[in-house]
Amino acid sequence: MKTVSRILLCAALLATAMLARAERTYNQAELDALLAPVALYPDTVLSNILIAASYPDDVREAAAWSRGNPQVRGDDALRLVENLPWHPSVKALVAMPEVLARMDESPAWLHDLGEAYRVHGPYVMDTVQSLRRRAQASGNLRSDSEQQVYYEGSNIVVAPLYPNVVYVRYYDPFVVYGPWWWPAFRPIVWRPFAPRVVVINRPVYVQHPVYVQHPVYTQRPVVVQHPVVVRPPVTRTPLRYEPEPRRYNGPPSPAVREQQRARQETQQNYYQRMPEARRGPTVQPQSHGQGVVRAAESRGRPQQQQQHRDERRRG
């Protein structure tokens, strides 16, 4: 009996482990909610956030280090953490302690963001572009004195106005994108922080830009040993406020299909419940002869009435 119990226990543990290792998939509503808090950050910052999300332990240790050194930021922070055993993307975020602290305060969101980026890399990039187009249409994503926003091909690029000066700002996802469109999946709202300018002259660990449709994944991170100078292209298309042509990105997600089905059922039920009186009167066709007779009768009636009035006066 004990042997059977042990076998069953081992089978249950094995099944639990296999379920834990099963790869989770995220629908479009979940991707929109996950990317909403960070999609409008400059490309270099957003790239480091997406990669650092896969190293939550390093993010937790780096956030604790930043809390212990509240006056250190920018180049000074990068110099002090250079030899610590963290992933390069996490080290780069130490220069921006406000963003690093908000990531550490949302462990569930951080885990889901890392998993979504690992499983749905290209779809994450497409979601970033979709969110940026919504913010652009709402008038909340444009070039200003701290950043430049422009098109590179069909993709929206967000870059610092000066290569070594990064302006880290706070924004509310329920404001910058307009009314939220997924009632069942809502983004987190970070604790507000004051906008800060970060000057970085030391090497920055930059991965592939976030607007690349199909990024190349490498097993080992590439550490840039010399300062990275990001220059905007010489010829670039100004930011246009017109919708991009629709393109086929695969079948709709389950959430979109459910919305389409519910919309069709609502329309069908509406027409079925509509009373016949609201559908307009039924007009019976008339023959040409009947129309002529009725017209003649209508013309003759006033003359007959006038004759009767004259006869009454003479009588």
Image (cartoon, grey):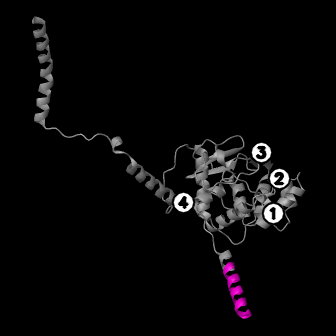
Q: Identify residue for label 2.
A: 74
Closer to the camera in the image, 170 or 290: 290
Image coordinates of residue 30 in percent, x first then y, are: 62, 60
Closer to the camera in the image, 292 or 30: 292
Proximity of marks 1 and 2: CB atoms separated by less than 8 Å: no
Q: Secondary structure at mark 2?
A: helix
Q: Earlier in the sequence, mark 3 or mark 2?
A: 2
Region rendered in magenta: 1-16
Q: Secondary structure at mark 4?
A: helix
Camera-near label (3 vs 2) is 3
Q: Identify residue for label 1.
A: 60
Relative to 291, residue 127 above or below: below
Residue 240, by quadrant, is top right
The kind of residue on which mark 3 rests is Pro
Q: Identify residue for label 3.
A: 195
- Separation of residues labelled 1 and 2 (CA atoms): 19 Å
Q: Earlier in the sequence, mark 1 or mark 2?
A: 1
Camera-near label (3 vs 4) is 4
Q: Earlier in the sequence, mark 3 or mark 4?
A: 3
Badge 3: how crowded within 10 Å, few (<14), some, or many (20+)? few
- Separation of residues labelled 3 and 4 (CA atoms): 36 Å
- Separation of residues labelled 1 and 4 (CA atoms): 33 Å
The kind of residue on which mark 2 rests is Gly
Q: Earlier in the sequence, mark 1 or mark 4?
A: 1
Residue 94, by quadrant, is bottom right
